[in-house]
Image: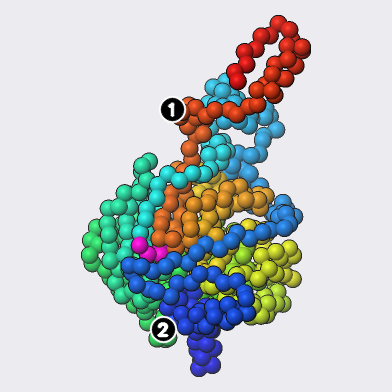
Amino acid sequence: MGSSASRRMEDSLSRSRAEDPSVSDLAAILHYLIRRLCGGQVHIISTNHDDSDEEFVAAASPPRIEHTPNTKNLQKSEITLITKQSCGLLQSKGRKKPKSTTSMIFSRESGVFGDGAFTRGDRCRITNNLLPHTKVHTVKHRNKMFCGIYSSDGQQFVTASQDRFIRLYQTGSEGLREVSHIQARDVGWSILDTTFSPDGRSIVYSSWSESLHLCRLADPENHEALPLCPDDRRFCIFSTVFSSDGREILGGANDGYLYVYDLECNQRALKIDGHGEDVNTVAFADSTSQILYSGGDDGLCKVWDRRTLNETSPKPVGVLAGHMDGITYIDSKGDSRYLLSNSKDQSIKLWDVRVFSSDDAQEYTRRVVSQQNWDYRWQKAPRKLTNAKDNLEGDTSVMTYRGHSVLQTLIRCHFSPAQTTGQRFIYTGCASGRVVVYDLLTGEIVKALKGHSGCVRDVSWHPYRPEIASTSWDYSVVVWGYKDTESDEEEDPVPKKVRRSPRIAEQQRKRSEHLNPSVTFTVKT
């Protein structure tokens, strides 16, 4: 135990500390000076943690991807069929349904759609053409924003920032309206994560503290500490999530353990020795809350079954190996089959948890990750990562998505909502200040929402509206929505003038008269 604890402490002090730059400021400054002397490029880093005038970390440059996505494994996977069915992209053997929205509506009235109603897939097919693309609301603050998520019903939105405040908003067509301003308790450097309870009545937040904290929104002044009783003195939970019944909270910590806290018994229910390094992210696989996912700085995703778990000698039911660097976030599709992982190797991977990696593949991934000698918090990603074309040996992932930057902090990624998109898309924050939306079926970027001047750490898609909220280290939250460009042009009081050369216009008039003498043109110069 002593050697393991010592190794973890060294790892924590030297490699990750992903959300605590205050500990590594001296190292950052020295590294900055060395790179300046060597003529290398550096990112602007923040060393001033004063609440009033802290300088945010400037956005990095977007990566340049020089090859097309490889969809060979994806096309053979069951998720392709599932996604197409969910999005209304599969046609029955009978009469084919029209493609355009207007044609679909006309055909529905003509009885093409059976009982005269769109299926859920039909509705998703329409709304997938209405992707968020423009700013509809911006909220500015004076500190780095770490978290921003919608509640499960979409009626509330919560943010957490480095100023130690949690802000609760009501959502609506006009944007976000702040209704509560809650000061967090026992915050070290910053609030690192926050999550809604399933009923939306409570939130749990984490920081550099030995306890999670529960805040019931009906009484926001009273916060309940949930002690996790770790062995390490310097301790934090990087990632938290509620179980579907709201009885338990799962967390991933910097000591390499997963923690489960039972709210009914009011005590820690489980402590799992999960990873050799920081556990950056955790998730429940589905609504049963029996299957757990975890990802850490060792580059591995692990799958745990609580029904067969022995806390004294925990063993995962399977491991997913293939990333070349640490994992920053995991999102479950909710079907206990598929999950996403975002990584410092500048990629998102899609996994089928029914296909685990071999022992040799796991060991190879560990070796590759241990050989990485750069620090994602202030250095530029190596070219061997940003332009990696081939997967690691033994990689069992279904698909790899590249085109966003994972730098500076634990950037998050998600499946798009099932109700409105059929989970057709994957979206993520980006160190370049963008929100990047991938087509799950092709691997191509379908939207890159540009508007932040700093790293976008968290993103959240409204469960029922075409809106994405992005939370950034430039101290702002931006709500992106869909706006009909045709209606915009009709409402524009100042029509745009078309610039045209009089000579070219006269040539076109003569050519048209020659082809059709009966047509008369009036040319305005």
Assess disc 1: are there few (<14), some (14-19) or many (≥20) residues with their C-alpha within 10 Å of its C-alpha.
few
Using residue 238 as the reference point, say whether residue 35 is left or right of it.
Answer: right
Q: Secondary structure at mark 2?
A: loop
**Residue flagged by tag 2: what amino acid is it?**
Arg
Task: Find residue 145 and name its label.
Answer: none
Observer-nearest residue: 140 or 170? Answer: 140
Instruction: Give the mark count.
Output: 2
Q: Most extreme residue toward the right, as rendered?
A: 515
Q: Quadrant of the C terminus?
A: top right
Q: Is 76 above or below relative to 296? A: above
Question: Residue 390: horizontal and vertical position, in percent?
Answer: 74, 65
Q: Most extreme residue toward the top, as rendered?
A: 518
Q: Which residue is mark 2?
A: 234
Q: Which residues are magenta?
A: 142-147
Please name the residue shown 45% across and 46% down the image.
135
- Is residue 25 in sight in this rendering? yes
Q: Is 118 above or below relative to 287? A: above
Please name the residue shown 47% across and 83% down the image.
26
**Residue flagged by tag 1: what amino acid is it?**
Pro
Q: Which residue is mark 1?
A: 493
Disc 2 or disc 1, which is closer to the eye?
1
Query: Does the magenta-highlighted stretch encompass residue 11?
Result: no
